[in-house]
Image (spheres, grey):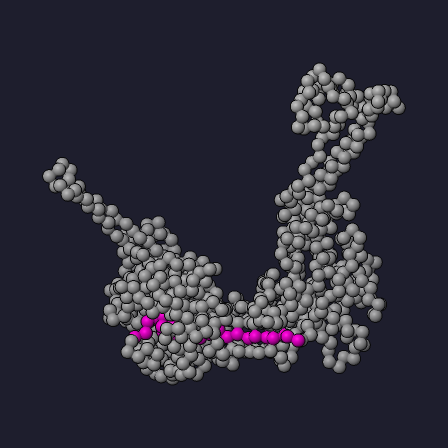
Amino acid sequence: MTTHPTERSAPADDTPVSFHDHLLPGIEAGRYRITVDQQLPAEDLPGARLDPVEQIVNVRAAQFRLDPSWVHAVYPAAHSQGPFGGLLPHITLNPAALPWEREPFTSGVQNPARDARAPWLALLLFGEGELPGDPNALGTTASVTVRALLDGDAAVYGPALDRNAVDPALFDTPCQVVDVPRDLLAQLLPEPSDLAFLAHVRTGGEDAAPGAAPDASPDAAPAEGHDGRLSHDGQRSQDGRLSHDGRLTQDAHAVITTARFPGTGRGRYAAHLVSLEGHVPPPGPQAADDKPVRLVSLHSWTFTSCPASGDGFGRLAGRFTPGNGEHSAAPLRPAPTAGSGLPDELATLLEQGMVPMTHITESGERALAWYSGPFLPRVAPGLPRPEHGHFPDADGLLLHEPRTGTFATGYACAWNVGRALALADPGFATTLVRLRHQGRLRRATERQYTTYRRQLFHSAPSAGPSGPAPRAAVRAAAPTPREQFEELLRGDALSALAASFGTPGDDDAEPRPRTAPAAPATYRLHAPPRSAAPQPPSSDARETAAWLARLRTLSGVPFDCLVPDQRMLPPESLRLFHVDRGWLDALLDGARSLDRHPAADTATDAELDGLLDDQGSVPAAGLLLRSALVPGWPTLRVEARTASGTVPVKVIRREPLGGDVLLMLFDRMPDRLTISEPHQGLHFGVDDQGNVALRSLAPGEVGRPLERSVPVGTDPALTVTTPAGARVLDIGRLAVRLAEDVKPGSPLSPAELAVQLVRAPEQLTLSFEGTTR
């Protein structure tokens, strides 16, 4: 078993990650006047000159509200806690051009010496007691209408926006705002000329669309890092900016970071993605009053930063390594208490994953029984099936345990659970009963048709050398109505029908004339046989099979049936298990027991079995993770692979159960498990010593560690402590300082600075080769 939560490790996925300075839209949001003037070459002709035509066009983009689906990820995760003191929180947006669709501030401040363009969005971090309207840093905002925001408020400094460029339909819609003290805003926001360093575009990685190229600039040669995973795009178009390219937007995400570090002590923080459009660069107007600045908050979340001794990702994941007692990754079993003195046969049952339970018999008596759920620390033997293939009731699944003289009730419980879940879903129960009735009706019709055809065959007159047999020899009793109808067909009426419709016995022959009917013995007295082509399954059959396939992944099964004893899964533990196929079969048999008649529903059950085989893989193994990693990192990455480490194990189901339990089911038992921070864990900041580990920017070696670093956290010129106690990074001065080491003589671009500030996500690799599971 190995662990490597190193700062120099590459991103957890194998897809290259590229950084770009920005992605400029084809046209910026605003109000445009389009003038069309047309003039013919010969001015002396009548109508040669036409009056110009003008049209006002409003190009609108997100301004007061942000679609929640546009927020791809945030870091730190919402409501998480950990040692985030050396990290720069950031937000990842799906529309890659969104931060550059508008202009920041009213004066359009821009540093002409730099090619990068400043975004109109900024990420601000506020601690407890800093915002008057949110003293506890819970992310609280005030709601005002767009009309009220445009009209302004005498108590605050609001944005100066063009009312004519706003859609009137938005005037009465609400937007969220925060009122920030002017001196605090001046301390947190960088210089307008340095604002561009806080936003960039990232392509590739786990977020990449399938088949999308990691480098999307049309005229930029791929610049892969030393490990093939980090790169930056240093190419520029003629105006010194990245041109808007459709390929880039396929897998691109905009990333906006804050310049403020969370505190090293414990404290809650609220992060707000705010709009700078229409504002004056801080410190703002010099006035005697102390009015705050009203900013539109497009998205907000909270997290808690605690000291390094707290439960961060590395500390939490490190508990699963060997030697950590009950926290270690181990099979799922109720281990006997040390020194309990249990007999060997009882200890063996516990080692096999069985739990002692109280069994109430049908007569009301209480007895000791053993229960085992679908998750076992061993490969379970096959469950013998009855002759007709399905168990009729739960009593047939009570297995006798000869060593203790008790019953094993696991399979019987699975049957009852399946039946209870089927009855609790009226839609499924109705569909299953209707499917069975349709099958019975279809088979009854086929049997009736077969019987009728056989009767017609036996009642047909046999032709001898002298012609048909006498009628009296066929009937031994009074004729029935059917026999009378058949007698009618055997006479002249049958000959007339045969002459009209042709000879059924010879489809290719010409119709015989009415005057020459064929002999009665040559006619078919039954319809031609039906086609042998298989019929497609009905919608009820497909719906039933899909429901059963979900149940086969234990969807809806109570957690107590999966883990019968909480001591099997203590807090901060990881447990591996094999899935008992017999338990799954018993569960499905109970669900399919509604209105089942074994003799009449054989064909329906066979049809369902065939459809279930086409519903994907059957779970064979899995893991249960009970840890603070589950709520703290909602998109935690767990990769299971075989012993070679190259073949991934198929994940059949992944779902959080409760607040801190994660369930994963695989198609086979993995030999290697990698737990890593999610892709938004590709974050930015300094290491534990407050240093920035330098990376190469040379073509073909982008991202390669240079084995040297720049102290940032201890340099007061680079990390400024504000009067409010906040640690704010002087992003512009840092870019100049890093350029001296990695790019002498040239300034760093936002993409190049992002490469320097990358902190790879931590990960833990557990190896199980050669171990007994």
**Quadrant of res 350:** bottom right
Q: Is residue 756 magenta?
A: yes
Q: Residue at x 27, y 64 (%)?
A: 238
Image quarter (top left, top right, bottom left or bottom right) of the N terminus: bottom right
Depth check, front residue: 533 or 745: 533
Q: Is residue 398 above or below residue 75?
A: above
Q: How many marks?
A: 0
Q: Position of residue 373 (x, y in %)?
A: 71, 64
Kindly give the residue lying farthest to the left in the view shown: 44
Q: Residue at x 52, y 66 (%)?
A: 635
Can I make out residue 237 in this image?
A: yes
Can I make out residue 93 in this image?
A: no
Query: Would residue 51 appear left or right of 547 to someone viewing this image?
Result: left
Q: Position of residue 306 (x, y in %)?
A: 48, 77
Q: Is residue 502 above or below residue 658?
A: above
Q: Is residue 609 above or below residue 208?
A: above
Image quarter (top left, top right, bottom left or bottom right) of the C terminus: bottom right
Query: Would residue 147 appear left or right of 338 to someone viewing this image?
Result: left
Over which residues does the magenta segment extend? 747-770
Q: Position of residue 232 (x, y in %)?
A: 38, 70
Q: Residue at x 35, y 61 (%)?
A: 218
Q: Position of residue 16 (x, y in %)?
A: 45, 68
Q: Is residue 6 magenta?
A: no
**Quadrant of res 359:** bottom right
Depth check, front residue: 237 or 594: 237
Query: Would residue 493 appear left or right of 94 to someone viewing this image?
Result: right
Depth check, front residue: 451 or 330: 451
Depth check, front residue: 26 or 564: 26
Q: Residue at x 32, y 64 (%)?
A: 242
